[in-house]
Image: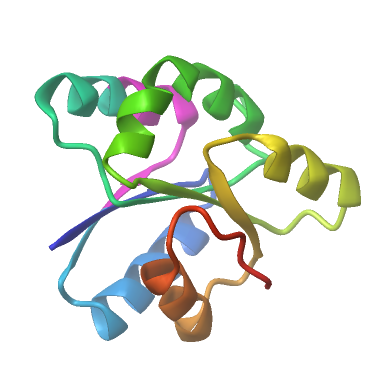
Amino acid sequence: MKKVYIIDDDEITLYLTRMIFELHAPESECTTFTNGNDAVAQLGEDSRLGTLPSVILLDLNMPVVSGFDVLSRLEPLAGGLLACNCRVFVLTSSVDGQDRQKSLKHPLVADVIEKPFDSDKLRVVLSEPLNERLST
């Protein structure tokens, strides 16, 4: 079973992304977060318990705590996330090339995926190894 975290402030995106996992990857267990603070707190607990997710889908543009802030807060957990082959994918509607470049410079980010999430992107997220950047 693949443990998946979806972090996005948009309820529709959370619902649709979760449905794609349920329909096309029912072996995945999805947990959704509407803000970065809750997600970082849960990831800290997961790190302590050794139950980190396999995949994190992270929106960049969220109020209060942006996706970039989440990435910064995850840096103390980077060793554990990388050791368990957790892959972070930025899932965004941003068309700003600087957002993409900044995201890809972060060592935890496997790739940037444009919204909307679909079954083709799901296959890529679930099949690619951590060390290879994906083309979307």
Residues rendered magenta in the picture: 31-41
Residue at image location 78% in from the left, 54% down from the top: 94
Against 98, is 117 above or below? below
Residue at image location 43% in from the left, 40% down from the top: 34
Against 39, is 84 above or below? below
Against 74, is 85 above or below? below
Q: Position of residue 24 (x, y in %)?
A: 30, 84
Q: Quadrant of the C terminus?
A: bottom right
Q: Is residue 122 left or right of residue 54?
A: right
Q: Position of residue 51 (x, y in %)?
A: 15, 36
Please state which of residues 110 and 98 is positioned toward the viewer in this rendering: 110
| Quadrant of res 45 | top left
Q: Quadrant of the N terminus?
A: bottom left
Against 45, is 66 above or below? below
Q: Position of residue 135 (x, y in %)?
A: 68, 71
Please state which of residues 135 and 30 is positioned toward the viewer in this rendering: 135
